[in-house]
Image (tube, rainbow, N blue to C red):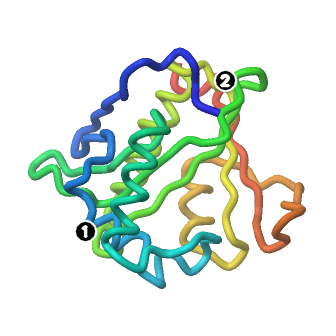
Amino acid sequence: MEHRNLKIFPILTTERLNLRQLLDSYVQEIFLLRSNTLINKYLDRQPSKTLKDALGFIENIKNNSLTYWAITRKENEKLVGTICLFDVSEEQKKCEIGYELLREYQGKGIMTEAANKIIKYSNQTLGLKTIDAYTHKDNESSINFIKKLKFKRMDSVDETNSKLILFRLNISNKNK
């Protein structure tokens, strides 16, 4: 569910990054993200097989989401990854976060910078209090990343996939 108060796509900035709406010109990078077997190893989604698949994905996101950001570097606007909020519940004041980064940009603090901005935006602009993140039990880099952001492992098990671990961040007092 999209947050109803949003009218235009929110562009967010950090020291090194712009978080902006996906553009058709990012088709090559989206294709690489959605077709790379290492990036997609722990994700339950159909990989892009062609540039047309990737372009279809971009069009779908552009038409249906105000909470799915392209992560671009300020100096050249090159897409390096994506980050999104989904399953937003205004009633429960919570959502889920998802993220992916091209392999050559991993380990450089880019996703941490982007995620911290999204967490702050989630609380200060959208009024959310809780963010969930599911990650595969064998995805050590994602688990370490989520822990670095201060998400806490929950005892809950995903009933549809027992290999997923739930982490939760209470942001009601964070970023104020």
In the rendered view, tell whether residue 169 sits above or below residue 40. above
Identify residue for label 1: 28
x and y, in percent, of residue 49 in the image = 41, 80
Above or below, comparing residue 51 to residue 90 in the picture: below
Q: Quick check: 95 above or below 156?
A: above
Is residue 107 visible in this depiction of the protein? no
Q: Position of residue 6 (x, y in %)?
A: 47, 20
User: Would you call the spot at circle 1 few (<14 residues within 10 Å), some (14-19), or many (20 or more)?
Assistant: some
**Residue 19, x across and y down, in percent:** 32, 41
> In this orientation, which residue lies closer to the viewer: 61 or 127?
61
Q: Earlier in the sequence, mark 1 or mark 2?
A: 1
Which residue is the extreme one toward the bottom? 37
- Reading the image, the residue beneath label 2 is 172
Q: In the displayed structure, does residue 151 sit left or right of residue 111?
A: right
Cα separation, mark 1 vs mark 2, equals 38 Å
* Residue ID at (45%, 49%): 60
Residue 16 appears in the figure = yes
Q: Label 1 is placed on what type of residue?
A: Gln
**Quick one: label 2, few (<14), some, or many (20+) residues within 10 Å?**
some
Compared with 82, 46 (above or below) is: below
- Which residue is located at x 79 percent, y 74 percent? 163
Residue 170 in which image quadrant: top right
Q: Which residue ends up furthest to the top in the rendered image?
A: 5
